[in-house]
Structures are given as structure tokens and as C-alpha cells.
Amino acid sequence: MLAGFVMVICFFASNLLHAADSIPLKIGAASKTITHKVGGWVQGAGVPKKATKIRDELEANAFYLDNGETQLLIVSLDLAGLDPPFAIRFRKAMGAASGIPARNILLSCTHTHGGPSVVKTNYLMPLDFEYLERLEVWLVELAKEAVNSARPGKIAWGKGSAQIGFNRRVCWADGSHSMHGDTKRKDFAGLEGPDDPQHMALFAADMDDKLISVLYHNTTHPTIFYAAGVYSSDFAGETRNILRGKFGDIPVLFLNGAQGDIAMTDQLNKRKEGREEKLKRIGRLVADETLRLYRDVKYHEHPVLAHSYEDMPVKVRLPDPKILAESRKTLARIDAGENVRGMKMIMAFGTVQLQDVYEKNPVDALPIHAVRIGDVALITQPCELYCQFGLDIKRRSPALITAVVGLTDGYAGYCPTIYGVLGGGYSGQQISWTRLEPNAGYMIVESAGKMLNSLWQGSKKK
């Protein structure tokens, strides 16, 4: 009697599992041009310039997944970042229009330095509120198009290597550190941290094997057109064009990694090349590795799709009173007409802004997301996280492939290691966009490890 009862239960459970497996994964995707008009301010910390031309189009590309239980919309934006209030506002508007829970919408910026002024890092250059209003309309349309395009599909993934990023924090014999530097100098003491050449790609296709979208991940600073006074999506646009030449006009997403201390220039072996040459070389390198991974894809029709998030409270470190006083004097000199520019202006403005914004409540909230798509783990966070933290998260991850994504769900500035804090300089000294307490990156690593292992429920790496 008991054996028969157990058999009935097992049969019932088996049917439930079969029914769950029979629910098709729906996949949607969409693209939207988000280039601003010529004459708008171009994002850049120390160089206030207006765009004189459009070198190539800026885009928002969206990738939508729905397995009947979880909806997820990942958006890649050709922008330097988004201030948290705008990221929250955009997600709410997109969610209301598309039916996706707002916290299941991830807005991830590529960090191109050839986009409009959307993060306030320059005393003389205002935020482009006109552009931000237009951007909200575009993103709402994008979300609706991605959902409306959804159809049964399947996912494939792969991991390779493409070295497009190198550590850019240079250590000197006196104990100071700087962002970039002449490593041929006698007092060069070594690089502060590691780099990460891991390249990950996701491929989404419909049930007729027609490609719907490509998403790839790597780690570097897209600064080829920094201070050029042009709008450009940087190497991500070049990669996108190459992939579309192969696959057709599909949405292509770039998710940037833990790139706070990473740049395209190898500090130990610097190349002599122009902007266009550099753009084509790196764009081709990334596209070729993505295409190589595509040759060996194995599609999965029912990959696990899971998502969790938390808003992690982090203390903010306020500036030293003496440095704050000197910074206010520097801004007063600029107001009086003195031509104080470059790093001196950046550090002065960042110091004063930090004090003015966070003096009464020196606490920030970092949105951390964990996503599982089959064997792929995504950890997203809003910082320019130092590379070491990304590597630490990967080492603790239960996933076969782990991608640590920055500049997502807002912009919280640089997040350096203790070495970076001790070495000081830009991204080490506390300013508005290097404001988080010294333990912040380590807290992100701890949180990411727990969230990912919870999604995998103790499963082991393959």
C-alpha cells in the first residue's frame, strides 16, 4: 500500500517537473539609437567640451528573458554612467510601461567617455537634463519593444580570453600611486593590482536557430575618444558593427567588468597608435573572440533563470577639513576667472561636492544583483570596482562562468582596494566619486558570494 502511494507521488512530481520543463523560455531583444544632438556637452572629468560631430551612434540594447516565473530585462547603454535618482526613475517608468518588475530591470552603462554629460564630474560642465528627459522616453519604448518581441527561444554561452584591459595604477618608490605614469622612470616600483582578460558571451536564438541577440562581457575603460569633443560608443560600437555584419541587424550588448583600475593602455608596453587604429584593433579583437565562442555553442532550451538583489548600506568617508578648505579656495579662483583646469579642478570639485552632498547623511546604498542564466552567473553593482574584487568574486562563485558587471543600477564611483586607498591619488583619495568606506569592495565580494551560492543552492562547478 505504501509503495503504491510513493509511486503515485513520484509520478505526480515527475509530471510537475515535466510541465515546468515544457514551459518555453521566451526571449526578446530591441535596440534604440540614443545619440544626442551636436553641441551638447561630452562626458569627461577634466576636459569640458561640447560635441562638434557624431563619430558613430550611441545605442541602448536590451535583452529580455521570461521563463514564466522570472522576468529579466538587461539593458546596455552607451553612456559613462547614470546617477542613482535617474536610474531609479527610468526603471520605474520602463517597468510601468512593459509589465516587468522595476527591480528586474538592470541598466548597465558601457562607460564610454564619448557620450553626453550624464554624471557630474566637472565643475564647469552641467548635467544635460534635456538629454536625460529624451533618454527616459527612449528607454520606455525600448522596454516595450523588447517584451513585445519575445518568442520561444534558447540560450548558449561560452568563456574565452581577450586582453583589452591592463592595470593602470602605477606605484612609485616613495609609496605614492598614480593613475597611469611613465614606468621607465627609475622610481617606478610596480603596478598596484591585476587585470582580467576573461571574455564571456551569451547567444540567444529562436527555435528556428535564428539569432535574436548577442551579449558579451569584458573589462576595460572605453576612453579612446576622451576629450575629443565627439560622440562615440568607442570600441563597443566597432565590435557591434562587426558582429552585425556576421549575424544581421540584431541587438548586441556589452557589459563592462570590474574596471576601476583598468585601462586599454598597457603601462609596461605602450603602443604608438592613433585613435582610429586603436578603435579598429580592439573592436576586432573583441569581435573575433566572440565569433570564436559562437562556433562551439551548445543551446539550452530550459536554462535555469533566477535573480535576487539587495541594497547594501555603505558608509561614506568625508574629506579632510584642510583639503576641503583648499578645494573651496580653488573653486573660488575658478569662479573669479582663473584658468584652473585638469586634475586640480577635478579633485577640488570632487572634494567640495562630496562634503555638500553627504555631510548630513554620510551613507550610500549600493544595489547588488545576482543573476543566474544556466551555467552563467552575473553579479552587478554600481561602482567602478577595482579588478581584484572582480577576481575574488569569481573565485567564490559556484558557476561555471561568472561575469562581474559594473556601472549598473546607478553610479557610485570608484571602489578601490586598501592598496588604492593607501596609495592615494585619483580614485584613492576621497572625492565625490571615490566616496565609499575602505571596506566597501570587500563587502561587495562577501555579499556577491552569498547571493550566488544561494541561487545555485550549493551546486558545484562543472
Image (spheres, rainbow, N blue to C red):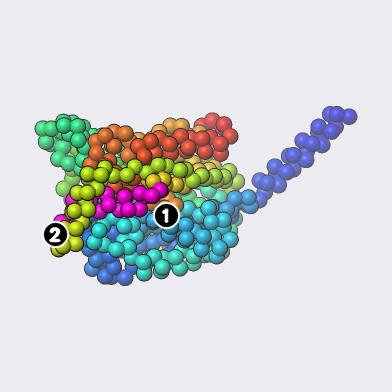
Residue at position x 40%, y 48% in the image: 361
Q: Relative to residue 232, is residue 446 depicted above or below?
A: above
Q: Is residue 399 magenta?
A: no
Locate residue 304: give its quadrant: top right
Residue bearing the label numbered 2 = 339
The image position of residue 273, as x and y in percent, is 18, 50
- The earlier-in-sequence mark between 1 and 2 is 1
Q: Is residue 358 magenta?
A: yes
Residue bearing the label numbered 1 = 84
What distance separates the C-alpha of mark 1 from that of mark 2?
31 Å
Is residue 253 shown to the viewer in this render?
Answer: no
Residue at position x 26%, y 62% in the image: 125
Please tell me the numbered disc located at residue 6.
none
- The residue positioned farthest toward the left in the image shown: 186
Q: Relative to residue 87, is residue 392 depicted above or below?
A: above
Q: Which amino acid does label 1 sit on?
A: Pro
Which part of the image, by quadrant, shows the N terminus? Answer: top right
Residue at position x 32%, y 63% in the image: 127
Q: In this view, does 129 lie to the left or right of 227?
A: right
Q: What residue type is labelled 2?
A: Asn
Q: Relative to residue 9, is residue 225 depicted above or below?
A: below
Is residue 102 shown to the viewer in this render?
Answer: yes
Residue at position x 63%, y 50% in the image: 69
Q: What element carries label 1?
A: helix
The image position of residue 385, as x and y in percent, is 36, 42
Which residue is nearer to you in this view: 139 or 265? 139
The image position of residue 452, as x and y in percent, is 51, 38
The image position of residue 285, as x and y in percent, is 31, 47
Looking at the rendering, the stretch of residues picked out in magenta corresponds to: 339-361
